[in-house]
């Protein structure tokens, strides 16, 4: 396909994450010369299936599976260097060349063992105190973002200066070990095997953290870059760039179901801040959404179904859709499609078009329900409220549509879908106010219906 050079596309999740962004980023990378990750950490998980082979990525942009494409980790990402190196080594064992194509922003805040310890201890303390857990992945993401906002974070660039790194590390350990022992009671917790080498008597120790960071710095050094400058240069040279979001809009720290959210901005606008480019460089925003809804962890979920009882629609979604988290393996809660939720996502992202994933999971359901609004405190609304407490009180207003018995697996043309599947998609587009430009009909890269290509000029 003849593409216009220099067009940039942002891909964001529009629900609570796990919408299938990885497959679409990989698929769209065919038309891009660079793929950029701009927020989150290794709490994200993107699963790709290419020629029947499954690959899970957590930090490296999904475009790495396309030979010759450059991949960038922007300053908006909090980085566990150890996990990044593990991921690189895994891809290299599978025959994928990574190091010559991956560029890591020197401004990325580092995730260090004390961040993980804080994350684990806080969730344990909440549980012991009778409070509801936030549902973090326990990987130190939130505490690392806290250090960034408090202007005390160690960043990738600090790895180049061992003495400076050591001095700042000692300061951080004094602060965080005080919180761990005095406030969180870390001496009574078991932190598991992964943290054991760094801890003694509930405190994170300086020497093992420092020594490992210096070892990792040598391996990372050739990949460290001024990502902002490289992206702007690539754009000026006519490259198409693809900006890959992690998690989903309803997990955004500002616009999501707060406090049951992640610690970064997942919305399209953060592609600019999290990569170091101007907003005028973002030409098209593709919102990825499942043909139903899922959510991992705690927090309100208005259209949630019983997804554990065999024979129910929710169980059908959970089992046929293989709804387990890529990163954590946790079961995903399942429910009907929520158009009122999508209206909120469309509003805060400025969506240009939708990609509907997992349409094939609904094959065989005789009846489908679609939420078009809520009853809340005696009134009706057609858009998701902002507060978690209000969302928890919402009663969905449903429309009922006929399902289909025919298989949609692998369909690549819209006209080849069952009539009721096409009507379902039309109703989603009308109810959300966003056109559907792509439909995914299985996890496989090539099982995709393209209505309008995001990289084509307007």
Image (tube, grey):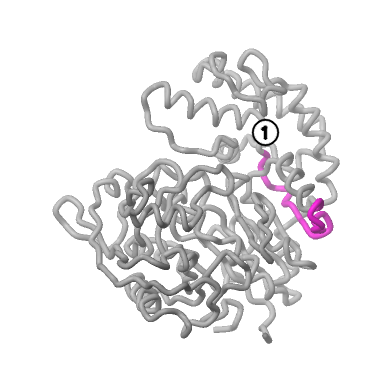
How many neighbours does mark 1 have within 10 angstroms: few (below 14), some (14-19), or many (20 or more)?
many
**Which of the pair 149/76 is nearer the observer?**
76
Question: Vertical placement of 150 versus 267: above or below?
Answer: above
Q: Quadrant of the C terminus?
A: bottom right
Magenta: main secondary structure: loop
Q: Position of residue 4 (x, y in %)?
A: 66, 83
User: Any magenta on residue 8?
Assistant: no
Q: Which quadrant holds residue 94?
A: bottom right
| 353 with respect to 180 (left or right) | left
Q: Decide if residue 216 is on the left or right side of residue 39.
A: right
- Total labels: the figure holds 1
Q: Residue at x 45, y 76 (%)?
A: 436
Residue at the (52%, 71%) spot, across then down: 409
Report the quarter where the N terminus lies: bottom right
Q: Position of residue 130 (x, y in %)?
A: 36, 24
123 vs 205, nearest the viewer: 123
Q: State the residue at coordinates (36%, 77%).
A: 420
Q: Quadrant of residue 281?
A: bottom right
Residue 248 horizontal side relative to residue 158, left or right = left
On the image, numbered disc 1 is attached to which residue? Answer: 112
Q: Position of residue 428 (x, y in %)?
A: 36, 72
Q: Nearer the viewer, residue 278 or 449?
A: 449
Q: Is residue 206 above or below residue 290?
A: above
Q: Residue furthest left?
A: 378
From which residue to which does the magenta span run? 92-110
Could you tell me which residue is drawn at 24 percent across and 47 percent down? Answer: 393
**Secondary structure found at label 1:** loop
Q: Residue 322, position in %: x, y?
A: 51, 54
Instruction: Please determine whether, in this image, residue 245 is positioned above or below residue 235.
Output: above
């Amino acid at each position: 396909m003849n593409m216009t050079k220099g067009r940039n596309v942002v891909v964001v999740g529009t629900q609570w994450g796990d919408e299938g962004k990885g497959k679409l980023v990989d698929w769209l990378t065919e038309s891009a010369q660079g793929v950029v990750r701009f927020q989150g950490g290794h709490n994200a998980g993107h699963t790709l299936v290419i020629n029947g082979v499954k690959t899970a990525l957590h930090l490296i942009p999904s475009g790495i599976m396309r030979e010759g494409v450059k991949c960038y980790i922007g300053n908006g990402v909090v980085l566990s260097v150890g996990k990044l190196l593990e991921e690189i080594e895994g891809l290299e064992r599978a025959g994928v060349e990574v190091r010559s194509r991956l560029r890591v922003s020197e401004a990325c805040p580092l995730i260090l063992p004390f961040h993980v310890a804080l994350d684990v201890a806080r969730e344990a303390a909440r549980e012991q105190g009778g409070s509801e857990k936030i549902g973090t992945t326990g990987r130190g993401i939130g505490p690392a973002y806290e250090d960034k906002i408090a202007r005390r974070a160690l960043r990738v660039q600090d790895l180049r200066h061992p003495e400076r790194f050591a001095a700042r590390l000692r300061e951080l350990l004094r602060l965080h070990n005080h919180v761990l022992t005095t406030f969180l009671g870390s001496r009574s917790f078991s932190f598991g095997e992964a943290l054991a080498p760094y801890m003694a008597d509930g405190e994170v120790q300086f020497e093992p953290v420092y020594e490992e960071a210096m070892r990792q710095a040598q391996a990372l050094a050739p990949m460290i870059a001024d990502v902002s400058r490289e992206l702007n240069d690539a754009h000026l040279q006519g490259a198409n760039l693809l900006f890959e979001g992690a998690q989903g809009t309803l997990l955004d720290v500002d616009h999501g179901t707060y406090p049951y959210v992640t610690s970064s901005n997942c919305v399209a606008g953060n592609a600019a801040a999290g990569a170091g480019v101007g907003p005028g460089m973002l030409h098209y925003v593709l919102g990825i959404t499942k043909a139903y809804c899922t959510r991992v962890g705690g927090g309100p979920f208005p259209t949630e179904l019983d997804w554990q009882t065999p024979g129910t629609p929710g169980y059908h979604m959970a089992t046929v859709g293989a709804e387990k988290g890529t990163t954590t393996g946790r079961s995903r809660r399942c429910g009907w499609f929520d158009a009122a939720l999508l209206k909120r996502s469309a509003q805060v992202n400025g969506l240009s078009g939708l990609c509907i994933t997992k349409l094939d999971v609904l094959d065989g359901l005789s009846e489908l329900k679609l939420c078009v609004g809520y009853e809340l405190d005696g009134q009706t609304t057609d858009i998701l409220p902002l507060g978690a407490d209000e969302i928890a009180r919402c009663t969905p207003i449903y429309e009922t549509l006929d399902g289909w018995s025919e298989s949609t697996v692998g369909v690549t043309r819209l006209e080849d879908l069952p009539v009721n599947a096409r009507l379902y998609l039309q109703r989603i587009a009308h109810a959300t106010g966003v056109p559907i430009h792509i439909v995914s009909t299985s996890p496989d890269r090539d099982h995709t219906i393209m209505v309008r290509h995001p990289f084509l000029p307007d």
